[in-house]
Amino acid sequence: MLFYFSGTGNTRWAAETLARATGEQLLFIPEEQQGRCEYALAEGERIGFVFPTHGWQPPRIVRNFIKKMHIDHAEGHYCYALTTCGDSIGVTMDILNGDLRKAGLPEASSLFSLVMPESYVCLPFMYTDTPEKEQRKLAVAAEQLKAYAELIVNKKEGEVHIRKGPLPWVMSHIVGSYFNGKMVTDKKFTVDSEACIHCGRCVSACPTGAVTFFEEQTSEDLHNNAFTHSHNFDGLPVWHHDGSCTCCLACYHHCPKHAINYGKITRRRGQYYFGHTLSN
């Protein structure tokens, strides 16, 4: 049983690859958290968690899901975790295992990180990778994931293949705590109404349903949050401001006209999602 979360597709690729290798069920966390989050394992079944690193920590949606979930008779089952990142993960896996321990679940004994093309571009020093660097990262990641999959299939305990980076505790517990506490918000998303072509890709790309298209609104309607839902993608995308956004930037990266921005900083930044070079 493999639980995963993905925004721009890097982690989905890794999770799907591992699910094929193990032959085990792949479960998408945003969909699972809508239910009871109660699970039963088959004899010998693995427990896997695959997710992106957000601000040198597991994403909030993953941590909240672990708090809610229950697995019958989970003790004794092989548990592993893999996280994707643009560069390093700090002590992300220590935080994950702490959450699993508090939830009464087995800790992940084998830990893996996978460096993938960068997709977070909302800070002054963060950009998407050059096409050359993107291709190098993908080639290395494919080889690493193949090796990781073999270890997981064979239930190898104690395998730790992670890139913590410099000052890992500081990056996760100080920088990461500020980032995940203050900067994971949809309130800075804006739309260029002249560039938007109402294609709906931002809505379909959002993994948590945090963005929807609405009919044209007056300024008074917007102030009062009085929206009229539109199923035919008229009007402009609107973010819900209800805490469901993970700031994964899937909406921004999938916009074919670069009409979506996060504040002012992304107006001159690149766009990336897994497989984009194959479809463009």
Image (spheres, grey):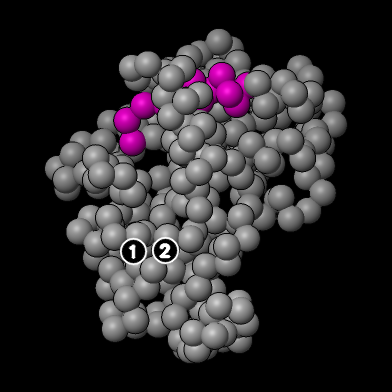
Q: In this image, 136 relative to 193: left or right?
A: left
Q: Is residue 94 magenta?
A: yes
Q: In this image, 123 relative to 210: left or right?
A: left
Q: Nearer the viewer, residue 146 or 98?
A: 98
Question: Which residue is disc 1 drawn over?
Answer: 261
Numbered disc 2: secondary structure: strand
Q: Residue at x 50, y 89 (%)?
A: 218
Q: Nearer the viewer, residue 1 or 197?
A: 197
Residue flagged by tag 1: what amino acid is it?
Asn
Which range of residues does the magenta coloring cover? Answer: 86-97
- Determine crowd level at label 1: few under 14, some 14-19, many 20+ residues with C-alpha closer than 10 A: many
Q: How far from the left and from the top, in percent, is residue 37?
A: 78, 45
Say whether marks 2 and 1 touch (CB < 8 Å): yes
Residue flagged by tag 2: what amino acid is it?
Phe
Q: Residue at x 24, y 62 (%)?
A: 267
Q: In this image, 175 relative to 31: left or right?
A: left
Q: How far from the left and from the top, in percent, is residue 129?
A: 22, 44
Residue 145 appears in the picture as rendered: no
Q: Residue at x 34, y 54 (%)?
A: 273
Q: In the rendered view of the protein, which quadrant contains the C terminus?
A: bottom left
The label on residue 189 is 2
Q: Nearer the viewer, residue 38 or 16?
A: 38
Q: Nearer the viewer, residue 175 or 274?
A: 175
In the picture shown, does residue 95 fall above or below 85? above
Rendering quarter of residue 140: top left
Numbered disc 1: secondary structure: strand
Q: Is residue 244 magenta?
A: no
In the picture shown, does residue 269 fall above or below 67? below
